[in-house]
Image (cartoon, rainbow, N blue to C red):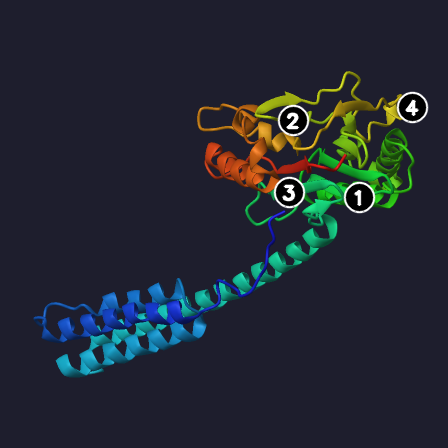
Amino acid sequence: MFPRRFSRDPRRPGKPRHALLAAPIALIATVTVVDILAPPSVHLGPFLVAAPAVTASFAGPRATGCIGAIAVLAQAVVAIVRTSLIDLNHSFQLIALILMSVLVTFFAYWRERREGELTRLRSVATAAQDVVLKPLPHRIGPLRIASVYLAAEREAQIGGDLYAAARTAHGTRIVIGDVRGKGLEAVGDAALLLGAFRSAAHRQSDLSSLVAFLEGTVSSDLDDPAAAEDENRGEAFITAAVLDVPDDEPALRLINCGHPPPLLLRRGEVGVLDVRRPAPPLGLTEFVDAELFVERFAFEPGDIALLYTDGVIEARDREGTFYPLADRVTGMASKGPDALLTHLRRDLLRHAGGHLGDDAAMVAIERLAGSS
């Protein structure tokens, strides 16, 4: 996952915003001079209200209030030079300018407060992401790993897509999944599955036992009386692909629970790790007793297994064409996991016009040479 760090609030006023204050001050000076030199029938005072209004769009209430006060002072100077402060026309201009300055100063205060709340929410989202969707290590045993998560909502940092890796005594186990639905319920279901995986990955002796444990955890949560009150909870499920990559064998074992099949990149070619007997998605309680079949695939040094969620392959361009993932990764195996996902991230966003319709997650796993 690409790291996110908040070194400074980008919305907090700083040197660039102080420089922007020169624009409304220059506007006030220009309008004042031209208004004084203009014929008696010409009144440019109403233009002064643009100065605090423009300031409120980028600065805080203090700066907006100061610019408003300067504009009022400038209007008073114009009134004194041209006629007097008690002149009816200039009096109404002053009153209107004072009222508008107060109004835009309040707007600047409200906007700054909302931005502060949004910044705090982003910080909470980042903290939640670090707990729920922990970054995968770049190296686990004989494997090199890279991952990326792209949230569909701009302000969101986590959603219903998930992935995790766990080290065992004989190898590495990896899960990638996609919760049906969106919002906080999807995040909760993702956290539930990730917690169960991290807890049981090193305790369950074989892959089928691990997947059965995950199924039992998800199903028991959906059967909870509190969840039954939600009309949509009965339709909830999680698609997942669970892998076991042994250290001493050039292979990987896979159970696919209704998830898009991983891709295997080998010597410039792309293959599909399509299982013959897929398991149903996790959480479909009527299939709890279904037999789970573990399928084995060759996974040699230099190979890259690419795991992904349906948000990747269902991303559409302006013409409605789905993202051709297999075509876009052909010949990319030699680049390594990090370069591969950097390329895919950029290419996927370009294909979708910069905005995804669904969350998307990808994990690239490479077996290093000399590891088997």
**Residue 354 sits above or below residue 274 on the image:** below
Q: Which one is in front, 280 or 168? A: 168
Side (left or right) of 33 relative to 287: left
Q: Which residue is drawn at 64% across and 42% down?
A: 147
Circle 4: residue type: Asp
Measure the alpha-carbon separation of dots 3 and 2: 15 Å
Q: Name the residue under label 2.
A: 263
Q: Which of marks 1 and 4 is in front?
A: 1
- Cβ atoms under marks 4 and 2 closer than 8 Å: no
Dot 4 falls on a residue whose secondary structure is loop
Q: Residue at x 19, y 78 (%)?
A: 78
Quadrant position of residue 307: top right
* Residue at the outermost front position: 370
Q: What element carries label 1?
A: strand
First-in-chain label (1 vs 4): 1
Report, in whole angstroms, how far the alpha carbon at label 4 lies from the one at label 2: 29 Å
Mark 1 crowdedness (10 Å alpha carbons): few <14, some 14-19, many ≥20: some
Q: Which mark is residue 146?
A: 3
- Name the residue furthest top: 276
Q: Are marks 2 and 1 in contact (CB under 8 Å)?
A: no
Q: Mark 4 points at which residue?
A: 289
Structural distance between the alpha carbons of marks 3 and 4 = 34 Å
Q: Is residue 216 visible?
A: yes
> At which x and y percent is residue 39?
7, 71
Please indicate whether residue 242 sits to the left or right of residue 161 in the image. right
- Residue in front for this viewpoint, 294 or 154: 294
User: Which amino acid type is marked by label 1?
Assistant: Ala
Q: Distance between the residues labelled 1 and 4?
A: 26 Å
